[in-house]
Image (cartoon, grey):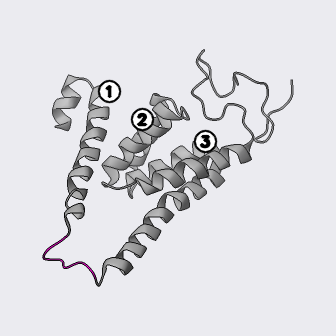
Amino acid sequence: MKVADEETPLVKGKNPSIDNDDDASHDSRDFEPLMDRVKDVIKVYWSLGFIAFGGPTAHIGIFQDHLVRFHHWLKEDLFLELFALGQGLPGPTSTQLLISTAATHGGVLGGSIAFLMWSLPGFIVLTTASLFLYGIIDPSNPPIWLLGVPPAAVALIFKAFYGFAQKLDTLGVALAM
């Protein structure tokens, strides 16, 4: 049997050192070369960076939707373990979850790049918007298109809460509320 490294996977299919169950289709480390996984991280986190508003709770819901349900990079149990680990460490949980989920898929390089890809779009958009709108908008009379931002943020937070509440038992849901 050939020894696996990050560039050359063992075989197509299941890697017994990573997964012991029969459903290995949701494991992000399934036999793609490291650089392909890093490219995936760049694509996914760059686009997620453009829709990342609403605060840490909304970010966690976005990660869960995209990484567990849409891209199938992580299994639900692993995502929840990474979330719990991020909760126990000092600092912003959503940022820790961002880096750990990306590192799970693309290694340490993927985690580092994901942080930049996640942060850069927001930095660019906010800096550009503030420079452009600084002299145009009167703070006492904001345009109507800015009035929808706070309700959209609340909706993202509720969606994240609802997703986690479905995974909790009845007592957990009552305590979360």
User: How much space separates mark 3 and mark 1, taking CA atoms?
Assistant: 23 Å
Q: Which of marks 2 and 3 is nearer the N terminus?
A: 2
Q: What element carries label 1?
A: helix
Q: Is mark 3 on a helix, strand or loop?
A: helix
- The crowding category of the residue bearing disc 1, from other C-alpha atoms within 10 Å (few below 14, some 14 to 19, many at least 20), is few
User: How much space separates mark 1 and mark 2, taking CA atoms?
Assistant: 10 Å
Indicate the position of residue 172 as horizontal and vertical percent values: 23, 30
User: How much space separates mark 2 and mark 3, taking CA atoms?
Assistant: 15 Å
Could you tell me which residue is drawn at 50 percent across and 65 percent down?
Answer: 120
Predominant secondary structure in magenta? loop
- Magenta stretch? 136-142
For the residues labelled 1 and 2, say whether their Cβ atoms are less than 8 Å apart: yes
Q: Mark 2 points at which residue?
A: 80
Indicate the position of residue 159 as horizontal and vertical percent values: 28, 39
Q: Mark 3 points at which residue?
A: 105
Along the horizontal axis of the image, is 13 left or right of 3?
left
Q: Nearer the viewer, residue 173 or 149?
A: 149
Q: Name the residue under label 1.
A: 167
Q: Earlier in the sequence, mark 3 or mark 1?
A: 3
2 vs 3, front mark: 3
Could you tell me which residue is drawn at 38 percent across and 57 percent down?
Answer: 92
